[in-house]
Image (spheres, rainbow, N blue to C red):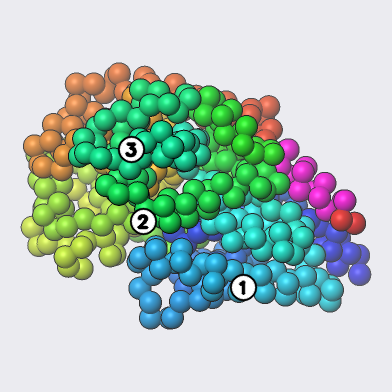
Amino acid sequence: MEGSKVKMEQAHVVMFPFILQGHIKVLLSLGELLSEAGLYVTFVNTHQNHKRLANLQALTTHFPNLHFESISDGLPDDHPRTLFQDFFEGMKTKTKPNFKEHIVSLNKKSENGLCPPVTCIIGDGVMSFPIEVADELGIPIFSFYGTSARFLWAFFNIPKLVEEGQIPFFDDNMNYRIHGIPGLEGLLRRKDLPEFCALKEIDHNMINFFVEETLAITKTSGLIFNTFDELEIDSVQNVATKCSKLYTVAPINALLQSQIGPRAQSIASLGSLWDVEQNCIKWLDSQPLKSVVYVSFGSITKSSISQLKEFWHGLVDSGHPFLWVIRPGAILDEEVIPKELEKGQKERGYVVDWAPQEEVMAHKALGGFLNQSGWNSILESIVAGVPMICWPYSGDHFINCQCVTKVWKIGLELGDWDRLTIKTTIKELMGSRREEFQESVDKAAQWAKNCISKGGSSSLNLEKLIKDIKGIKEIKV
C-alpha cells in the first residue's frame, strides 16, 4: 500500500535518555522536533519510567510519528533506583544487552513492514553503552549532551588536571582556583568540579570510568548539544575540536514552541514523571506583577527537615509571596511536609508536588527563580527573562552557578542555607539589584530568541541535523 511504502521510506531514529526527569524531558522535546519534521521516532525508556510518564497517548496524538517503547534496566522491580552508582554499574552488563536486543527487534519488525528500519540512534551522552551497541550493529549514532558547554569542556580537561597534579586535592581549600583550562581561566574553583575530584587520594578507577564515558561521545557521528552559540561560543568552539560534527540546538523547548506554535501550550506538561499541579497557575494569577519567588530544586535534590525549615523562614521573612515545589521523596528524614510549613503556606506561599514549570516561568507574576542550578532550569529562566538564585547541589550545578553569577551576571549564588542568608539574598535579587539583573537576563533572553528564529544558529543546526539523518537513510537505501 502507498501509505505503508511512505512509512517505510521514513528515516527512523531511536532515542534513549538517561533515567532522570531532566534528561528525559529535554531529549523528548528533541524527539518531538524530529517527528514534526517527518522522521519516525522511537523513544525508548526503562520500564519503570515508561510506566510513570504522563499522557503518552496525548503526545502520540500531537506527534503521530512519535512512538514510545521500553526495556528492562536489569535491576529488580523492587530496587529503589536512587543510587545512580548502581545504575551506572549495571548499564554495561544488564541494560546494554536489553537495548541491543530491542534495536534488533525493531529491524525485524521492519522486515514485516511494521516500522522503517533503524537509520540511527541518539543516545544520552552520559552513557557510553548505546555507542557500543551502535558500533556492534553497524548503525550510526549521535550523542545528545544536556549540560552547558563549559561543563563538558571542563570534563574533557580532567585528565590534564590529573597529570598536572591539580587533582586530587591535597587540602581542604575548596575555593582554590583551577588553572590551565583554556577559556575557563579564573572562573572555576575546586568545588565547581565533579564530586569525585574532591577525593584526597586519587581513585583512578572512578575517574577513568567517568572520563571514558564522556570521551566516548567523540567517537559518534556527531554531538547534539543543549546549548546555544551566543551563550557559550568559546566553549562550544573548544568542544567542537573534539567532535566530528556539533549541533547546538538550545533552548530546545523554546525551539519546539517556535516550530509548532499554539500547540506547544497543550503539550508543555506532557511526558512528566510526576503529576503536574495546574492549580498553582490560578494562585499566580492573583499575585502582583513580578512579585513571586518560584522555588524548585529539580528532580534529584534532597533536603533535610532542618534545611526546609530554614528555607521556609527565609522565604517568609523576605516578604515576597512564593511558589515552592517539594516533590515526593525530596525530604531526607521523613516523607511529610512539617505542619508549620503546611500552616504557613496558606498565609504567604503555595506549595506543590510538581509544577508546570514552563508555564510558571512565563507568568507575569514571577519575579525570581530559586533553583539548584540545573541546566534545563537555567535555560528556561533565560528564555523567560527571569533572574535567579542558585543553590548548587551536584554534578554540573556548580559550574552552571558560576556561569549565572560571574559570566552572564543574571543572578546570585546562595552562599549558605540559613534563614538570614536566604532572606537577604532574595531581597537583593528582588529589590536592591533587580534592575541590574533584569537588564542582564533580558539581554540573554534576546540571544536565545535570536538563535531559535528563522536563520538563527539553533534553528539552522536543527535543519542540518535533520538533513544529515535523512542523508544517512538515503545512503542506506
Residue 88 part of the magenta segment: no
**Residue picked out by circle 3:** 192
Residue 361 screen position, x and y as percent: 38, 41
The boundaries of the magenta stretch are: 462-475
**Mark 3 touching mark 1, by CB under 8 A?**
no
Residue 299 - label: 2
Going by the numbered disc 3, the residue's amino acid type is Asp
- The Cα atoms of the two marked residues, 2 and 1, are separated by 28 Å
At mark 2, the secondary structure is loop
- The Cα atoms of the two marked residues, 3 and 1, are separated by 35 Å
Which tag is nearer the camera, tag 2 or tag 3?
3
For marks 3 and 1 on the same chain, the one whose residue lies earlier in the sequence: 1
**Residue picked out by circle 1:** 97
Picture layout, residue 165 above or below residue 348: above
Toward which corner of the image does residue 6 lie, by quadrant? bottom right
Please indicate, yes or no, whether residue 65 appears anywhere in the rendered image. Answer: no
For marks 2 and 1 on the same chain, the one whose residue lies earlier in the sequence: 1
For marks 2 and 3 on the same chain, the one whose residue lies earlier in the sequence: 3
Going by the numbered disc 1, the residue's amino acid type is Pro
Front residue of 328 and 188: 188
